[in-house]
Amino acid sequence: MSTAIHAVAEALLKARETNQTADTSRFLDALVGPEDAYAVQAIVAARLGWHDGQVGRHWKSGGAARDAIITHAALVPAGIWRSPAAAGDWPLHLHGVEAEIAIRLNCDVTPAMAATADALSAQAWVSEMAVAIEVISTHWDMGYDTPSWLKLADLQAHGALVIAVWQPWRDIDWDAQSLEMSPRLIARTAVAFGSKRQHVDLGN
């Protein structure tokens, strides 16, 4: 494993320890692809004991567009909250929020399964879904302008996840669902699953 990967990991560990953002300019070209970023994630998670040597239970996966590279990050267990939640003194640096739909799997999904999955087979692996709020944060001082692989190394700018009540998975018309976000709290997200409306709240 390269010296650069270890240097990025140490910078992120120090940032988490001190609750200060790291100097991004020192590492602009340190990581050359997603595998380097995943190596940094693994070092940080192991040092902080997030997953006890096991596969993470909560994951963030996605990309900027449907044809973009899909990236992944195992999330910090202590930052997974049930709605209504209060951020309190949880360390955050950007305070952005994104509305999400969380899903719960009913089986382990191997790389071979994922490589051959289609929409129908993937839905068979999902047991439940819930409205969620992702709190965006970073440990890099360039914030939203952080280079992609450094951002991925920092759990893809993840701060915390607030999850509403789980409900059974069903295949619905996602394009027909409505979404509201309210500024009265840090965030209130409401999504209508067909005729049922579900709220998830995050206060300070």
Image: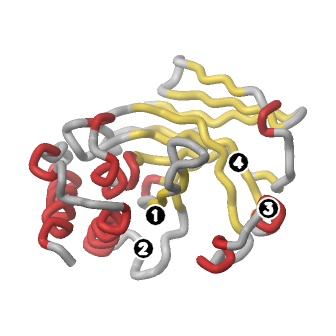
Q: CA distance from mark 1 to mark 2?
A: 9 Å
Q: Is residue 139 left or right of residue 72?
A: left
Circle number at residue 162: none
Q: Secondary structure at mark 3?
A: helix
Front tag of 1 and 3: 3
Q: In the rendering, at what x and y percent does residue 42 appear?
A: 33, 71
**Which residue has dot 4 on it?**
130
Q: Is residue 149 left or right of residue 124?
A: left
Mark 1 and 2 residues: CB-CB less than 8 Å, in contact?
yes
Q: Residue at x 75, y 36 (%)?
A: 198
Quadrant in the picture for the C terminus: top left
**Which residue has dot 2 on it?**
51
Label 2 Cα crowd, 10 Å radius (few <14 / some 14-19 / many 20+) = some
Asked whether the viewer can see residue 45, the reply is no
**Which residue has dot 3 on it?**
123
Q: Mark 1: which amino acid? A: Ala
Q: Residue at x 46, y 63 (%)?
A: 74
Q: CA distance from mark 2 to mark 3?
A: 26 Å
Q: CA distance from mark 1 to mark 3?
A: 21 Å
